[in-house]
Image: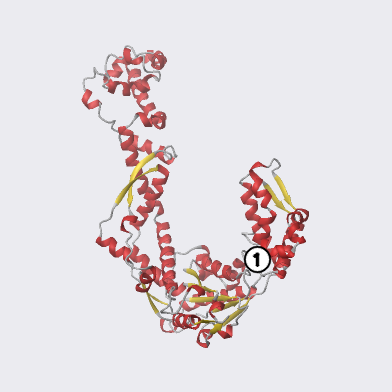
Amino acid sequence: MDKDTDNHGNFEELLPRQIVEELDRYIVGQNEAKRAVAVALRNRYRRERLPKDMRSEVVPKNIMMIGPTGVGKTEIARRLAKLTKAPFVKVEATKYTEVGYVGRDVESMIRDLAEAAVHLVAEEYKAKVRDKAKSLALERILDKIVKMVQDNYDDYKNCLEADLAAEITNDIEAVAETENAENNADAKEQSADAAPQGSEKKAAEQLGLPEDLESLSKLLPGGFGNLLEMAVKSQGHPNEQAKSSPKKLDAEDREKLKKLLLAGSFDSRLIEIEVDDNAAQDVQLISNAGIEELGVNFSEILGGLLPKRKKKRKLSVSEALEIMESEEADKLVDFDVVKREAIERAESRGIVFLDEIDKIAGEGTHGGNPDVSRGGVQRDILPIVEGSAINTKYGIVHTDHILFIAAGAFHETKPSELIPELQGRFPIRVNLTSLGEKDLQRILVEPKNALTRQYEALLAVEGIELSFTEDGIAEMARMAAEVNAETDNIGARRLHTIMERVLDKISFDAAELSEKKVVIDSEYVKQQLSDVVESRDLSKFIL
């Protein structure tokens, strides 16, 4: 049990009623399906609290969702996985073929699940070390910036003028003040437009600057802030060789540069860094299908045999910081631990959503063409659902306690046409209802990610204040329901097409509109969809 998960990820704190309420924020209706998945999730928590000998005997009750497209089957499973931070994969049953035929073998769904689990766990571990990784990356970037400033002080003076250059000026003036306090005010006025005289010359001597500064001062409109730079270039300097070397920055200067770096002063500056040249080691020996069947991570094997190659890239400081932060996080995370935990989580919490299962139902001939792989795919899926050991590049994954959720419309076939053994492995059947006009109207406004809110946010980028009236939303829902009834019923997906059609002109002219406040009411909706109302046949092609 992962004790580090928080919020909704700690599913032991979620009661079935709370799970349903959370799903209600994104999915309208389909309460029967929500209750089924909520109970299945709670049963996982209950199973993990059982004694070890009993725990192994309790298998998950797989679910089969039956309903037309666009009613929320996939969204329920996806939101459930996000809710629990569980490894989740959605696969299409139609892309698998029986062993011996061209196509993906069914075991690849478990390899995909293991991949998702590793990614999920790795991100969690990286989040724990993110602050430390960022600090280490910052120091690496700072090393490069310090070296650049030392070697090319002039180029970076604009960033440093308020700090290091001002500090140099203050040092010179401070020495002058100690030598001749009564002339301090005059010395400051002269420092802006004339060469230093008297005590200022002594101050320059104490700082190791040349005595003859008069000729140089004419070239110094910036006053004392430029004295050190000009002194380095002066031919009469007694330590000319030493002073011509790059400026040495101390710890205090480094701290000032760090503040500038954190403030974003260097974000747009280009620096050169070394990154791993992954393309150089991308060697493919056999086809993708062959690699899947072997379950071997060739990249790791070859990575151990071949030396890691680096390549230099010039990036902005902000981009380099992101890359280095990722590199440092990878170094801080023990990926052996990640793999072990990922395999365990995939086995105990993994969810496989098997979509379009109705397309592999039935056996024999369909439309005069023999389809020999339908029954074969079912027979190949059966042992995975029953429980078997699948070899992946991260280790062996046992599928005994993975939750499988199958879904299909079953327009041309029915669940009873699946082989009996597979039917028995999906004991919970849930029928999802078609969406009516009222449901579509609720979908437009109630979910957290409602389409109306999405379009309002999108057009707000262009300065458009978009709003929808109740009658405008009702008209779009009515039109979507009518088109669904008279053509193919694609459920809530019809709303995407309706919305795009209604807002097509506004979206195209948004940046050029003088009137920034736009109200979508029923009259506007009817106007934009008038050609659809006139020609129902045409709507088959437009919507």
The answer to whether 113 appears left or right of 284 in the picture is right
Establish if 452 lies above or below 463: below
Q: Position of residue 467 (x, y in %)?
A: 70, 51
Q: Nearer the viewer, residue 238 or 390?
A: 390
Q: For the C terminus, give its image quadrant.
A: bottom right
Q: Position of residue 139 (x, y in %)?
A: 34, 44
Establish if 46 lies above or below 519: below
Provide the secondary structure element on which disc 1 rests. loop
Which of the 4 image quadrants contains residue 365?
bottom right
Q: For the N terminus, give its image quadrant.
A: bottom left
Q: Position of residue 498 (x, y in %)?
A: 68, 59
Q: Position of residue 185 (x, y in %)?
A: 41, 15
Which amino acid type corresponds to the residue marked 1 in the rendered image?
A: Ala
The answer to whether 239 appears left or right of 515 in the picture is left
Farthest front residue in view: 368
Which of the 4 image quadrants contains residue 225?
top left
Looking at the image, which residue is at 52% across and 77% down? 43
Residue 543 in sight from this viewpoint:
no
Looking at the image, which residue is at 66% across and 45% down? 509
Q: Which residue is mark 1?
A: 492
Residue 421 in sight from this viewpoint:
yes
Q: Nearer the viewer, residue 111 or 445?
A: 111
Query: How many tags in the picture?
Result: 1
> Badge 1, how many Cα within 10 Å: few under 14, some, many 20+?
many
